[in-house]
Image: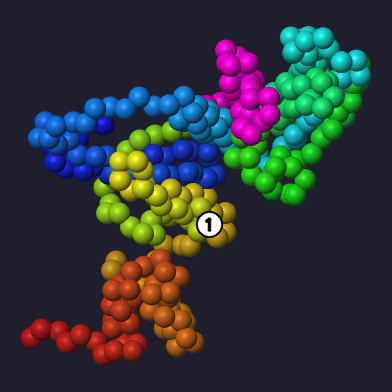
Amino acid sequence: MATMAGIAERYRKVKDFGDWKEIENYIVAPNLGNTSSRAPREKPTNEAVRKVNQRKAVERCEDKLRANFKPYDKFTTLTFAENPDSKQKAARAYDAFMKRLRRRCDKLGIEVRFCKTIEQGERTGRWHIHAVINDEVPYELIRDCWAKCGNIFVKSLWGDGSGFANVHNLAEYFVGVNKKDKRLDEKIKSERTYSFSSNCVEPVITYEPMSAKWLDVPRVPHGWTLVPASLAEYVDAYGLKHQKYIITRLPDDDIPKPARGYRGRLSEADTKQAWELEQSGASRKETAKRFNVCERTLTRSYEHYALGSPLRKKRE
């Protein structure tokens, strides 16, 4: 994304998860050329590099979890009756379990998706497996296919109070943030702390230039709504502004219908309804938003149907 000399450009990063999208508006610093001397670049510390890598790992895991799983999917803990000698043996037991589960689900026409991590208990030293499995897979099949290995414990992923508070916390858990075993450090630096099944899709991420001006409250497309709690702004290390927010798709019954009637004004029936709404105490701005038009169009409709202000005099 090159920029013209001296001109800052605005871009939009969109992560599409189907019924909702995460959008980030940001500014690219202008290219000022060699007009000033550049300060020598400082070498980042190992701790700074570790934090950046950890943050990116959590973001990648979080995006893929959002693209493949829902809050009501199953967070499953698989324990062993006989503790395996190594992580490799625990992984082989899980692969055999998943092979049995998929064979039985294929007969029912059910696709199995999962994300797993294999851990060793800090106090007991026993190996166990945490796996996110899509909700379409029946609990009884999971229990029967793992019965020969040990026990299972199942709860929802997040949002209902029994699982994680949100998908970000779940991603941090899989990546190993705040774990005492420090799985991202030297001990297991060469291997992934989690893995997805091959049929899990990658999130759709697009970059596009911003054509509209920067707004404190961004506009959303028709049929979508802004999640107010998700709106956040911050300034990066280079002093450039970023804006992040989430929009969700409205159900068909909640999508406001476009204005009916002549172009440039509401129909007579809608104009009377809008006028009655304003007379009941609603502001002009709120009424215009309710009928999906601008305030100028609403005023023009009142004038045309002689509501609230006289008709414009026609030129002789």
Question: x, y (%) of residue 156?
Answer: 75, 41
Q: Nearer the viewer, residue 56 or 231?
A: 56
Is most of the magenta stretch helix, strand or loop? loop
Towards the viewer: 61 or 113: 61
Q: What segment carries the magenta color?
A: 175-202
Residue 19, quarter of picture: top right
Judge whether residue 184 is colored magenta: yes
Question: Where 219 falls versus 260 (above or below)?
Answer: above
> Relative to the observer, which residue lies in front, 135 or 115?
115
Res 289 quadrant in image: bottom left
Residue 91 colored in magenta in the image: no
Question: Looking at the image, which residue is at 87% across and 19% down?
Answer: 80
Res 224 seen here? no
Q: Residue at x 87, y 15 (%)?
A: 83
Q: How many marks?
A: 1
| Mark 1: amino acid | Ala
Q: Is residue 35 left or right of residue 239?
A: left
Identify which residue is drawn at 40% across, 49% down: 234
Residue 219 position, x and y percent, is 38, 56
Question: Would you name the residue on which mark 1 appears?
Answer: 229
Q: Position of residue 240 (x, y in %)?
A: 30, 45
Asked whether, in this view, residue 153 is left or right of residue 204, the answer is right
